[in-house]
Image (cartoon, rainbow, N blue to C red):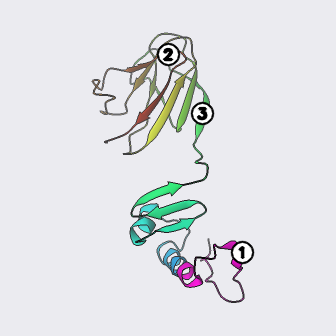
């Protein structure tokens, strides 16, 4: 990915930016991006920590004091047709890899799935449209609501549960 061009009198189109943002401020942001992300890869925390005051707004995303606020639609990954693994053990559980996971086949009580490794602030949504209760296990030694790591959290048919990681 090429570096972002600075704004000049020849390439500046005023209708593409809010009138309250001076070109100097935009050039400052462009310089920052070109310095810290010349290959197009940049950690959001880096931008947020470097922007004081009101932060910056890029495509309806506000970066301010380490927090990110969006006004647009947040797209999430989804697996709409999963089969819980028969047998009901943690070791055999189907590994969930998406933000939204819909189990459409859970034929026997305790067929199992395994949550991804937790990251603080992450959410994983699991819905059970199967015929039986599904056993949900935390990955590795992680626990769900202080349930022993070897014991499952149960999601019964027609239930949808949002799992939020508060610690790792």
User: How many C-alpha atoms fall within 10 Å of the one at disc 3: few (<14), some, or many (≥20)?
Assistant: some
Residue 167 located left or right of residue 107:
left
Classify mark 2: helix, strand or loop.
loop
The residue at which mark 1 appears reads as: 15
N-terminal label among 1 and 3: 1
The Cα–Cα distance between marks 2 and 1, rounded to whole angstroms, is: 58 Å
- 2 vs 160: above or below: below
Residue toward you, 108 or 32: 32
The disc at residue 168 is none
Q: Which of the 4 quarters of the picture holds residue 144?
A: top left
Provide the residue span drawn in magenta: 1-27
- Residue 123: percent from left, percent from top: 45, 39
Q: Judge whether residue 2 is colored magenta.
A: yes
The Cα–Cα distance between marks 1 and 3, rounded to whole angstroms, is: 40 Å
Callout 1–callout 3 Cβ contact below 8 Å: no
Classify mark 3: helix, strand or loop.
strand
In the image, what residue occupies the spot 43% across and 16% down? 88
- 153 vs 1: above or below: above
Classify mark 1: helix, strand or loop.
helix
The residue at which mark 3 appears reads as: 79
In the image, what residue occupies the spot 53% across and 15% down? 157
In the image, what residue occupies the spot 72% across and 74% down? 15
- Residue 72: percent from left, percent from top: 61, 52
């Amino acid at each position: 990915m090429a570096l972002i061009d600075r704004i000049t009198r020849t390439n500046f189109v005023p209708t593409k930016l809010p009138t309250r943002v001076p070109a100097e401020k935009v050039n400052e942001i462009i310089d920052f991006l070109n310095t810290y992300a010349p290959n197009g890869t940049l950690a959001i925390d880096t931008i947020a920590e470097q922007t004081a005051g009101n932060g910056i707004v890029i495509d309806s995303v506000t970066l301010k004091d380490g927090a990110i606020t969006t006004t647009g639609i947040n797209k999430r990954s989804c697996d709409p047709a999963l089969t819980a693994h028969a047998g009901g053990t943690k070791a055999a559980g189907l590994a969930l890899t998406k933000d939204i996971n819909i189990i459409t086949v859970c034929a026997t009580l305790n067929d199992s799935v395994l949550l991804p490794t937790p990251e603080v602030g992450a959410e994983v949504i699991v819905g059970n449209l199967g015929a039986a209760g599904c056993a949900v296990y935390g990955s590795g030694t992680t626990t769900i609501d202080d349930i022993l790591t070897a014991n499952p959290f149960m999601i019964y048919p027609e239930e949808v549960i949002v799992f939020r990681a508060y610690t790792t």
